[in-house]
Image (spheres, rainbow, N blue to C red):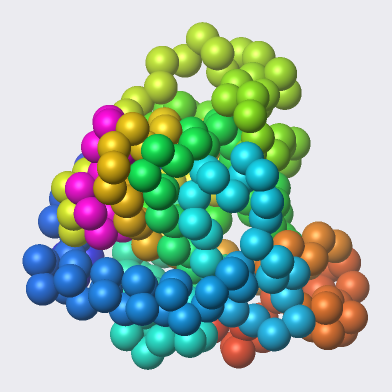
Amino acid sequence: MKTAISEEQIAFYRQNGFVVQEDFLRPDEVEELKSAVLETVASMGTRRIADEGAPSKEKDGYYKAVFTQRINLWKLNATIKRYMLESELGEMVGKLAGVDEMRVWHDQALIKEPYGNPTAWHLDNPYWSFYSRDAISVWIALEDATLENGCMYYIPTTQKTATFKNVGIGKNLGALFEVYPDWKKIAPVALPLKAGSCGFHNGLTAHAAAANMTHKRRIAMTCAYMPGGSTFNGQQNILSVDYVKTLKEGDILNNEAQNPVVFSKEN
């Protein structure tokens, strides 16, 4: 895992809201992680979230055909846990975001199936159970992510002007621009990635993916990280019913079983 990050990459990330790390994983690491992801996805059947008591039903209709989405695989597979909770990766996201502590929010396998629907423009953080301008995700290509099979697209600098208003991922590819009309004037950037490379993006950076126009799967593994000290905003999102019952708005999300620390300047 190549976790060294340059000052130029940090500056690019903070200006644009995303950055690339080429050759993040070696070929043998790609194969190890991909095998673990596919095995765990298969074991979950139609269950979308690994956690007991979480809203786990697989979504139907258009959304189901956007991607096969499975969440918190790190709780089921030791290999995935080792990669997603790697302390050097934690330090990397902490440096990019410029925060003193990072916790896992959730991981996601995102597999765009052959001829899968496009992923509409959206923001990540407004869906989650906390609000932060410094949340960050890593998006790892486990197969080549190309213009043809649905690589990621970003709209630079949108993390600077985003509020926590958002839209769902639906049939209207550009619904987000009804909320943020000025963003229509900014040219999107496509981010094709070879297997093993990755992108990082801010939880408030507008992003999307095109349809998979090929007969093969586009396989990616992602993980979102939450700054330490983040507080519950009242949204259940991927949390279990029982855990939400213990929370009130403003409570710090510091449950080690749910959101373990992956980086702390104090350690």
The answer to whether 126 is drawn above or below residue 263 in the figure is above
Instruction: Identify the residue at horizontal 49%, vertical 50% (top origin).
Output: 67
Residue 203 screen position, x and y as percent? 55, 48
Residue at the left extreme of this rendering: 27
Work out whether residue 244 can be spotted.
yes
Q: Is residue 226 above or below residue 14?
A: below
On the image, the x and y values in percent for residue 59 come to 67, 55
Magenta region: which residues?
Answer: 140-149
Q: 263 or 40, which is in the foreground?
A: 40
Q: Main secondary structure of the magenta part?
A: loop
For this view, does 226 lie left or right of residue 58?
A: left
Residue drawn at 45 percent across, 27 percent down: 155
Q: Residue at x 83, y 85 (%)?
A: 242
Q: Is residue 22 magenta?
A: no
Residue 87 position in % (x across, y down): 34, 79
Q: Quadrant of the C terminus?
A: bottom left
Nearest to the observer: residue 26 or residue 53: 53
| x 18%, y 54%: residue | 195
